[in-house]
């Protein structure tokens, strides 16, 4: 993982790094260069992604529960139906990120550096979700949401 995370992304060419459906739980990926990587369905729970570059990455259906995302660049990242429960997003840039259907229960978003232009359509949140000052949460999901299967399950 160290070699992959520290590679020179300028040499990727038209090829996209494909780590989709990998188990990277608890992986140490501090400062990793994973921009535009395919991480769809990847288990990154409890992963150390401190200051990682995930700009433009595909994280659809990924699990980031308990991950350390402090200072991570998630600009224009696809986060459809991602689980962010308990993730640390302090200083994270979510400019233009798509969080459609993301599970934000128990997530503290108060320290997010940029949430401008983020798509929050259908995000799942509750009273344990902490929103940044000045951000009005979208309507809460139906009370029976926990029984809804994730589309990627």
Image: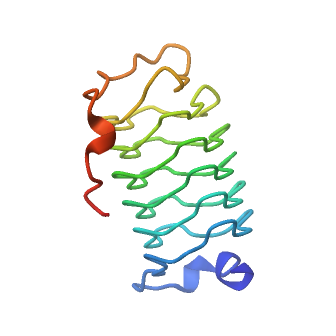
Q: Is residue 89 above or below residue 36?
A: above
Question: Where on the picture, by quarter, is residue 25?
Answer: bottom right
Q: Position of residue 68 (x, y in %)?
A: 69, 50
Q: Position of residue 39 (x, y in %)?
A: 46, 70
Q: Position of residue 151 (x, y in %)?
A: 25, 58
Q: Residue at x 47, y 37 (%)?
A: 104
Q: Which part of the image, by quadrant, shows the C terminus?
A: bottom left
State how many labels appear. 0
Residue 28 shown left or right of residue 111 in the figure = right
Q: Which part of the image, by quadrant, shows the N terminus?
A: bottom right
Question: Where on the picture, by quarter, is residue 103?
Answer: top left
Q: Residue at x 61, y 44 (%)?
A: 87
Q: Is residue 105 above or below residue 12?
A: above
Q: Viewer-proximal residue, 81 or 34?
A: 81
* Residue 78 seen in the figure: yes
Q: Residue at x 63, y 49 (%)?
A: 66
Q: Position of residue 131 (x, y in %)?
A: 52, 22
Q: Is residue 115 above or below residue 58?
A: above
Q: Residue at x 60, y 59 (%)?
A: 45
Residue 122 shown left or right of residue 12 in the figure = left
Residue found at the far top of this picture? 134
Q: How is the protein colored in the picture?
A: rainbow
Q: Is residue 122 above or below residue 83?
A: above
* Residue 122 seen in the figure: no
């Amino acid at each position: 993982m160290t070699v992959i995370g520290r590679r020179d992304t300028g040499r990727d060419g038209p090829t996209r790094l494909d780590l989709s459906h990998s188990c990277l739980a608890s992986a140490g990926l501090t400062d990793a260069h994973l921009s535009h990587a395919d991480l769809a369905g990847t288990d990154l729970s409890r992963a150390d992604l401190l200051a990682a570059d995930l700009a433009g990455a595909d994280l659809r259906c990924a699990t980031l529960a308990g991950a350390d995302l402090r200072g991570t660049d998630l600009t224009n990242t696809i986060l459809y139906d991602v689980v962010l429960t308990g993730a640390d997003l302090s200083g994270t840039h979510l400019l233009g990120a798509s969080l459609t259907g993301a599970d934000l229960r128990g997530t503290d978003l108060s320290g997010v550096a940029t949430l401008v232009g983020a798509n929050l359509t259908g995000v799942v949140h509750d009273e344990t979700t902490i929103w940044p000052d000045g951000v009005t949460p979208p309507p809460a999901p139906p009370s029976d949401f926990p029984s809804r299967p994730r589309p990627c399950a």
